[in-house]
Image (cartoon, grey):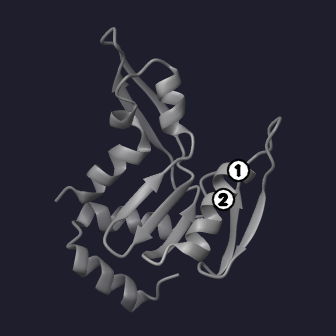
Amino acid sequence: MLEAQQLLDWRRKLALNERTERLIQQVRSSEPARRVAGRRGNVTGFFPSRKMGHTVQYASLSNELSAIYLMEYHEDDLLEYWDQPPSFTLRYKTKAGINHGHLHTPDFFVHRRERRRLGGMEAGRRIAAAGREDACAVSTQCIWPMALSAR
């Protein structure tokens, strides 16, 4: 986890706008937005993160725990990651032109040396399965990096 001065230096290097800085502070100072719950066919648990200095929760062995292992041990550009950041509403139009929205909690909020990103293991797949050809346009993998980069 970044110390206060490291975080300040990182913010300056990326020239973050005020809105983005408020969002990052909210994520860093909040408890996880939800507790992961076990469902049929998945295994939940807690991973003792050395990088973060606290335990990080996961809701699946094959997706989220694998992502934690990658972030923890194999991604040199990763500075810190936060599990279950605050929820937000995904808004999009269906093919029929109807406005749609639903509350979504990303799996992680990730700080890298050159960028920051919210990410969900399932969001893009669920939207694509619902018949959206442009799943990337409404998944957290694509919306949030653009929103966080806006100046």
Residue 106 vs 39, above or below: the answer is below
- Answer few, some or many: residues within 10 Å of disc 1's Cα (few below 14, many 20 plus, some between 14 and 19): few
Quarter of the picture holding the C terminus: bottom left
Q: Nearer the viewer, residue 102 or 38?
A: 38
For numbered disc 2, what is the local secondary structure?
helix
Distance between the Cα atoms at labels 1 and 2?
6 Å
Q: Position of residue 85 (x, y in %)?
A: 53, 57
- Identified at 40% across, 66% down, the residue is 24
Q: Position of residue 26 (x, y in %)?
A: 45, 64
Residue bearing mark 1: 62
Q: Residue furthest bottom?
A: 5
Residue 15 vs 83, above or below: the answer is below
Q: Amino acid at mark 1?
A: Ser
For numbered disc 1, what is the local secondary structure?
helix
Residue bearing mark 2: 66
Seen in the image, is 81 located left or right of residue 45?
left
Q: Do labels 1 and 2 touch, CB within 8 Å? A: yes
Seen in the image, is 121 located left or right of residue 16?
right
Q: Nearer the viewer, residue 26 or 61?
A: 61
Observer able to see residue 59: no
Observer able to see residue 112: yes
